[in-house]
Amino acid sequence: MSDKLKLSDLNSILKDLDVESLEGVTIEGDIELDIQGGGGMNPAMAYALGHEAAQISLHVANIARMLGYPVDQLFAQCLGAGGETAALQAEPAIEELMQTKFDVARSSEWNTPIQEVTLGATSADGGSRGHTITLGGEKAMPFYFDAEMPNRNYVTMDVFDMPISMAKSVKSNYEDVMGDPAEWAKKVVNEYNADMVTIHLISTDPLINDTPAKEAAKVVEDVLQAVDVPIVIGGSGNPQKDPEVLEKAAEVAEGERALLASASLNLDYERVAKAATDYGHAVLSWTQLEINAQKELNRKLMKQCNVPRDSIVMDPTTAALGYGLDYAYSNMERIRLSALMGDDELNFPMSSGTTNAWGARESWMKESPLKEDSDWGPREYRGPIWEIVTGLSLALAGNDMFMMMHPTSVQVLKEITQTLYGNIEAKTPDITNWITAEV
Amino acid sequence: MKINSPLDAYKYLPGTNCGRCGEDTCMAFASHLIDRSKSGEDCLPMVEEDKYAKKLEELEKLLAPEIKEVTIGTGEKSVTIGGDDVLFRHKLTFFNKTAYAYDVTDTMDDKELEERINTIQTFKKFYVGEFLTLDMVAVRCVSGKPETFAETVKKVIGLTELPLVLCSFDPAVLKAALEVASDKKPLMYAANQENWKEVAGLAKEYEVPVTLFAPNDLDLLKSMAKTFAEMGIEDLVLDPGTFPTGRELKTTFENFLKIRRAGIDGDGEIAYPIMAVPLTAWMAYDDDVSASYWETVVASVLTVKYGDIMIMHSIEPYALLPEMHLRDTIYTDPRKPVTVDPGVWEVGSPTADSPIIVTTNFALTYYTVESDIASNKIDCYIVVADTEGIGVEAAVAGGQLTADKIKKTLENAKFDLKEKTNYNTVILPGLSARLQGDVEDKVGSRVLIGPADSGRLPGWLEKNWPPQNK
């Protein structure tokens, strides 16, 4: 049997009871409180109901007290406040904010730090670099609050061993140094604040100039002379020629702890790995948007070629914004999450060929080739931001080092990644009344 | 979502395998419930028959996304935000792309207002078969006057169907605007520590979604959300403040991470969509290009992690294009295929005199080439080589695009160049120039090297097609 009562009914019944003289009272049957409205109640109704409920609880509490139950203690426990006023606190739900604390757990899954890899060697370690750069070491996803990020992101700027075609807004920065890699390297370090320099020996490609490896190695020496930052040495991308080119380059750069770019599954990676271990360099392990291929190549470098863990950096491939960045982003994010959760075949710092952003037509084309599109606006501004956003999204996926081209892109990417890293002090505006800001 | 295996969902289904949902079995339907490609209401027996009503209700509660969905606006242009179930897109996908709102103010003259709104609602960029567009207009009350604001809001409604965000901390101003706009279901911005009682009253009275603003105070934000929910106001959007620079920007980023992680982890009191206001970048930078750049940068960070709606100022194409593309990047369903079928495909109505263009089966590459050609009304064949979903440049470097692959594609499609075409000539992408000799030998055709970007194909074809001598 069940009695349905309105709250107010119950209240009036209880009110009429003289609780002071209550004796032998029994409450029979089930009492069902039917509160209509739920979430859709209006504040006035909620207030009225709250009032009724509180009154009832006072009456019932009095009954309980009569029966010898330690009511006050219970209220104090439940509501965390003094017994007398506790029952009343439920009332003003719409008059005062319901105080609550925000809390969130730190990740318990991320238990393995990323391997640290140091590039460059100073005279103390037999090199001639002015300083070294350490990549990796993260214990959490980038810039997360779960753990301090030990090393910031770094940018290495591209230098080529011959004049190449490039987007107009990039080219205008390098016209005076194109054809002189040493001067080019100086320019990116001194004027554009590059942390490192990548010398791409693209003229060695048999289909371009087929520059002999030995000759190309001289360019590496020139660059090492010109600047004292750590360097990356890149081949032409020709899988037949690159191992030989990188061997010779590694030899002349012995002791400088350069990064050799790259070892991949479609060339003789053993030769590249051996060049790195023989002459004390690190090796870039390059795969194409495939996490399992990345694991395979890293495993081969470690097990088959005996490359030490502290000498491997990965390039899981960067696709430009609008041209597959979604794959590149998630590929990196998956790699980094797996690494933090203990996958020791993926537990290395990552590098991004952010320059690939300049392959996107949005970065260099004067206007849209499609008649249906809105005006794309001036490309001088479109290009650099394309490179920035491509790199920035990958920074958030876990990328450590960025290979880049445009000085503005480099400056802005460094500004935002170091802001998120916590390195930038700035007097931020008061946003309390941003709505009326004059912008 | 409180369950994560098809078996958990299956328990609630009729189990009759009636097939009315379009699936052969209830189990197959259950797996679609889990990947969110179908919803409980797609099971017609459960909707129609009373005996299933309770189970359907229970099931829908279990299937509801962790982050509440909030709809702003009415009709075709309305936007829904929130609805996520995961912290990383590869674990499922992100739902309801970030809604981008661009601002106007009630101190703009009519001409400026009209021009800005026109740009916001007409800006479009073709991409993989559809147009990327912008979503909303945020109207800021700068005048401080209720009647001025209401007047502007009325004008804006006359100019656009896009959903609105009504921005003021003054309840009187908000009320005046709601009087003229509440049937359009705009998003109110915002309740804060001072005005929340009055704003809650407005949300109740006019039945519109509302933003809670508590700059860098997550306790306050959660207290407000809890209080509003208790009052029955659950169409909430949370703004923890977007500080544009310095350590405060780092904190802003962390606040977004914290709110979303707590929500996905099951703290229902804070499981609402999050708003970012990259517009604050304009308070930190003086010159337009720097401000616009930094605004795009802040918007990018908070689009990736975990902004559901944002208010911005720059409507320069160099800001809009990367913003729209990045949003598309993050919200594209990672479960959709990367590739198109290899083969020889026709664009338009090609004849024996039409060009034969080689590309890869990476979906983005294919659709880009296809749209460049189709948009310019060129009839041609596209030879789509199976490069395992890798684009041209990378596929040449990685050995997935080779002369053998191209030859095999033609053979498999039984496309004999000498038989079906008059020129026995294929056009290779500019980025695969190094394959020229090899393709000539293996395919036995002439090879022309096309432009590096297919956007230049129309101009290139004009100069180079048909080839000079047969």
Image (cartoon, grey):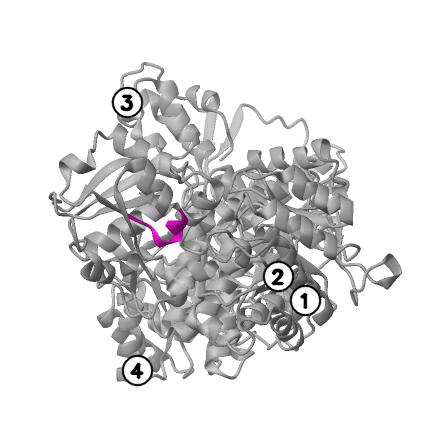
A121 lies above or below B18: below
Mark 3 and mark 4: Cα distance apart in space: 54 Å
Q: Which mark is residue A223?
A: 1
The amino acid beneath tag 3 is Pro
Instruction: Say which mark, if any, is on residue B98.
Output: none
Q: Is residue A118 magenta?
A: no
Amino acid found under the numbered disc labelled 1: Val
Callout 2 touching callout 4 (CB < 8 Å)? no
Q: For the magenta stretch, what is the residue range?
A: B427-434
State the predominant SS element of the stretch in magenta: helix
Asked if disc 3 and disc 2 are in contact, CB closer than 8 Å, the reply is no
Q: Are marks 1 and 2 in contact (CB under 8 Å)?
A: yes
Which residue is more in the foreground, B437 or B407? B437
**Residues flagged by tags 1 and 2 on a common chain:** yes
Q: Is residue B291 visible?
A: yes
Q: Which image quadrant is residue A127 in?
A: bottom right
Residue picked out by circle 3:
B45
Q: Chain of mark 3?
A: B
Q: Report the mark closest to the observer, 3 or 4.
A: 4
Q: Residue furthest right?
A: A124
Q: Quick one: label 3, few (<14), some, or many (20+) residues within 10 Å?
A: some
Chain of the residue under label 4 = B
Q: Which residue is mark 4?
A: B112
Q: Secondary structure at mark 2?
A: strand
Q: Are marks 1 and 3 on the same chain?
A: no
The residue nearer to you, when weighing A178 against B273, is: A178
- Magenta-colored stretch includes residue B433: yes
